[in-house]
Every structure is written in C-alpha cells, then in structure tokens.
Image: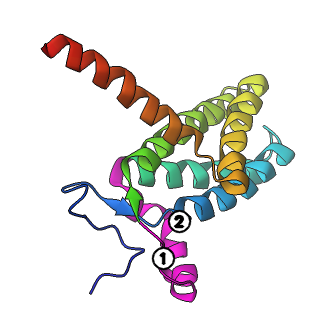
Amino acid sequence: MTDASSLTTSSRNAGFAQVDPRAPRFGAGITAVLLAAIIVLGPTSPVGLALLVVQTLAFAAGSLIGLQAQPWGIVYRTFVRPRLGPPAELEDARPPRFAQTVGLVFALAGLAGFVFSLPVLFFIAVAFALVAALLNAIFDFCLGCEVYLLGKRLFGARAARAAS
C-alpha cells in the first residue's frame, strides 16, 4: 500500500510522478537554514564547506535521481508525514525536481567560489539559492517551479507553432 507522501502516478497525469506538495516546502526550510549557516560561516570556513557539500549532494540527489532520493524529502516522509493528515492533492514532481537542478547549479557555483577563492561568486551563488529556498519555505512560492512552468509555456507554444 502506498501512502500519499510517496511518489505515485495518477490517471490525471499518467506516467508522471506525483509528490505531496508539503514535502518540497519542508525541504526548503532545511535548505534555507543550511544556506544561511553557510553564508554566516563564510567562504573560508571548513564547516561551511562541509555544509555546502552536504547541500550540494542533497540538490544532486533530488535533481539527478529524483525527489524520492532527496534527503530532506526522505526525512519528511519518514518522520513528518506520518504525523500529518493526507495532502489535499498531489502535484506534478517535475517542477520541484527542476528546482532541485537550479539549486544544484547555484550550489556548484558556490563550491567553485569556495575552491577557487572567489568570495563574490561564493556569496552571490549561495545567496541566490537562499532567497529561493526562503521564498518556498516561508511563502510557499517555488521560484524554480515557476521557471519550469514558464519554460513549458514558452517552449510548448513554440513547438505547437512549429508543428502547424
């Protein structure tokens, strides 16, 4: 038996994974705390580097493997979800997975800033990721998801025009 927090498929979106929309918001909260700590610790702290590597790996798991492998999602499904009622509905997992990819790009840029002693790159990259995580955690506004949907509209319209 599959609970509602697990990734499933629905007849409405056959073939596409679905996710409890509360899970990415929970993960964004953890991500925001880590990214804030990384900024406070700065581009020379070994602890900051370790935290940035952990967050980069979390983004990589969510982006490259899928949301079912994202560590903060696993924490949500294991410890938080069983204490909540079922979600009102599930949502398409593709936009949050794209958001994980965007986070991965910024985290990699932050790592490059750390490794190559480019503090401006470090702070800008980590700060952009932090702002996106805070938007999701506090306001339930997933910036990466919105970019994904905008891209679908733009490229979908172009593809439709090209086909006709």
Q: Amino acid at mark 1?
A: Arg
For marks 2 and 1, give the CA distance.
8 Å
**SS for callout 2:** helix
Q: Which residues are magenta?
A: 64-89
The crowd level at tag 2 (other Cα within 10 Å; few <14, some 14-19, many 20+) is many
Residue, x 34% and y 67% (percent of image)?
A: 7
Disc on the earlier residue, 2 or 1: 2
Q: Amino acid at mark 2?
A: Ala
Q: Is residue 23 left or right of residue 156?
A: right
52 lies above or below 105: below
User: Between residues 30 and 53, which one lies in front from this camera angle?
Assistant: 30
Residue 114 % position (x, y):
70, 34
Q: Is residue 134 left or right of residue 58?
A: right
Q: Is residue 102 left or right of residue 112?
A: left
Residue, x 41% and y 27% (percent of image)?
A: 151
Residue identifier under label 1: 77
Quarter that holds the C terminus:
top left
Quarter that holds the N terminus:
bottom left
Residue, x 59% and y 55% (percent of image)?
A: 54
The crowd level at tag 1 (other Cα within 10 Å; few <14, some 14-19, many 20+) is some
Please tell me whether the stretch drawn in magenta is mainly helix, strand or loop: helix
Residue 14 % position (x, y):
19, 57
Residue 106 % position (x, y):
59, 34
User: Residue 76 magenta-drawn?
Assistant: yes
Residue identifier under label 2: 23
**SS for callout 1:** helix
Outermost residue on the left side: it is 164
Residue, x 21% and y 20% (percent of image)?
A: 160
